[in-house]
């Protein structure tokens, strides 16, 4: 049994159809890459570290990096009222005088909630969705409380589109994937047919396909269709619906691609001699904006205790926090992902300049918890043992 397969076998059931990848790296490159299981069971296609997978909420970290690049370019302002960019007034109805900014959206302190659906059809108007008072936390004004909320990121995507005049997925390609020479995309549309053909299928533990069963081809419709079933992306209007390309979790990227983003973090904004983030921007990315103090936010069982601009900080030394999947007390920066029975992580130890990218598919919703707030399988993949 391979080392990675033994890590995945922590589940109570047999490791197949569970699959996984683990890549370790430092500032200079990849140190080791391991894979196990099948990317596509029906096709009997074994997983490789270059196969693209929907990595869930690690997507938020990628979005934050691009926002900071656009801030550097003078296209965006972290602290401006996003209403000015959206072209309509975005406010918590219970706190109408408090503006919502990119800084608050990226750090989950906007007072938005996920009480409304953030997976919207192609023809949806986000303005109408967010006019519903239940989209908001009436008890807490923006900037006063942390609540992890996926809906924040469709709003960020809408702001990006309005500021650039371009589709969100194309901005991500131009600002991050292209400069890093990564084959990646959001919701497949900007990926090549060859890349989409290598998709990692996301499965239930029993082998039922849940997502990205592309069957060796690019999906005919890579987004949530309009209410009438149409999937014509010429209907796109900048900023009208920032949810089209799933900025909160729809990034498709390989384990090696994730490691390259990790090397950007390990290199403090530099990869292979190319600087993508200025020292000031990287410092902003690597600085917590919220730390749990016992009452200023929701930790989801001690999972979230310190957060910044799309970045999670681990090993928070605060009562009630259990956010250290490595178990060594060292602060790391990165993000975790959890959707469609996938668990993923990208973590960098800045002090040593090293990191790990990993994911596992087919993980049961009731997978055993480890010694931290993370599942046991995530801890084993993080630690490599």
Image (cartoon, rainbow, N blue to C red):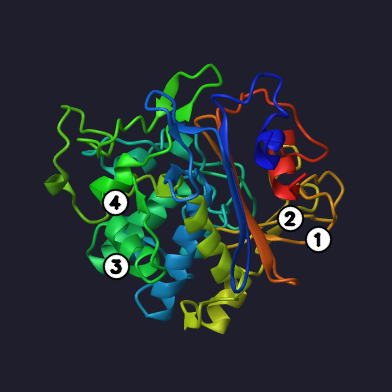
The residue that appears at 57% across and 75% down in the rendered structure is 282
Q: Crowding near pointer 3: few (<14 within 10 Å), some, many (20+)?
A: some
Q: Which residue is mark 3?
A: 163
Separation of marks 1 and 4 at Cα, in angstroms? 36 Å
Q: Is residue 124 above or below residue 102?
A: above
The image position of residue 226, as x and y in percent, is 20, 33
Separation of marks 3 and 2 at Cα, in angstroms? 33 Å
Please report contact status of discs 1 and 2: CB closer than 8 Å, yes or no. yes
Q: Which one is in front in this view, the residue at disc 1 or the one at disc 4? A: 4
Q: Which one is in front in this view, the residue at disc 3 or the one at disc 1? A: 1
Q: Earlier in the sequence, mark 1 or mark 4?
A: 4
Q: Is residue 330 above or below residue 79?
A: above
The image position of residue 358, as x and y in percent, is 60, 47
Classify residue 365 as left or right of residue 127: right
The residue that appears at 67% across and 22% down in the rendered structure is 366
- The circle drawn on residue 330 is 1
The image position of residue 5, as x and y in percent, is 66, 35
- The circle drawn on residue 191 is 4
Q: Crowding near pointer 1: few (<14 within 10 Å), some, many (20+)?
A: some
Classify residue 343 as left or right of residue 151: right
Separation of marks 1 and 2 at Cα, in angstroms? 8 Å
Pick the residue in front: 244 or 370. 370
Residue 77 showing in the rendered view: no
């Amino acid at each position: 049994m391979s080392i990675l397969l033994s890590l995945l076998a922590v589940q109570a059931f047999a490791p197949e159809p569970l699959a996984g990848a683990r890549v370790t790296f430092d500032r200079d490159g990849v140190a080791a890459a391991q894979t196990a299981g099948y990317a596509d069971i029906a096709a009997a296609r074994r997983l490789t570290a270059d196969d693209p997978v929907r990595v869930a909420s690690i997507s938020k970290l990628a979005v934050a990096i691009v926002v900071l690049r656009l801030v550097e370019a003078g296209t965006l302002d972290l602290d401006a009222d996003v209403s000015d960019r959206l072209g309509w007034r975005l406010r918590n109805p219970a706190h109408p005088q408090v503006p919502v900014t990119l800084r608050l959206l990226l750090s989950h302190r906007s007072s938005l909630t996920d009480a409304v659906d953030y997976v919207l059809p192609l023809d949806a108007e986000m303005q109408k969705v967010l006019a519903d008072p239940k989209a908001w936390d009436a008890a807490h004004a923006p900037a006063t409380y942390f609540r992890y909320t996926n809906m924040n990121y469709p709003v960020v995507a809408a702001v990006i589109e309005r500021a650039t005049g371009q589709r969100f997925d194309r901005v991500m390609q131009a600002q991050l994937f292209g400069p890093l020479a990564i084959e990646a995309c959001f919701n497949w549309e900007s990926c090549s047919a060859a890349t989409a053909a290598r998709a990692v299928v996301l499965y239930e533990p029993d082998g039922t396909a849940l997502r990205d069963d592309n069957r060796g081809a690019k999906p005919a419709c890579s987004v949530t269709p309009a209410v009438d079933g149409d999937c014509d992306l010429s209907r796109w209007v900048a900023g009208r619906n920032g949810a089209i390309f799933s900025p909160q979790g729809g990034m498709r990227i390989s384990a090696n691609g994730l490691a390259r983003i990790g090397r950007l973090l390990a290199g403090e904004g530099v990869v292979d001699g190319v600087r993508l983030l200025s020292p000031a921007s990287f410092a902003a990315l690597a600085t917590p904006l919220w730390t749990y103090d016992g009452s200023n936010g929701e930790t989801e069982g001690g999972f979230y205790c310190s957060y910044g601009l799309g970045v999670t900080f681990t090993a928070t030394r605060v009562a009630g926090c259990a956010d250290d999947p490595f178990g060594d007390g060292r602060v790391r920066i990165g993000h975790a992902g959890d959707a469609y029975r996938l668990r993923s992580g990208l973590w960098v130890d800045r002090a040593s300049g090293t990191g790990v990218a990993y994911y596992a598919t087919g993980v049961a919703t009731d997978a055993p918890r480890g010694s931290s707030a993370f599942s046991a399988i995530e801890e084993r993949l993080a630690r490599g043992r």
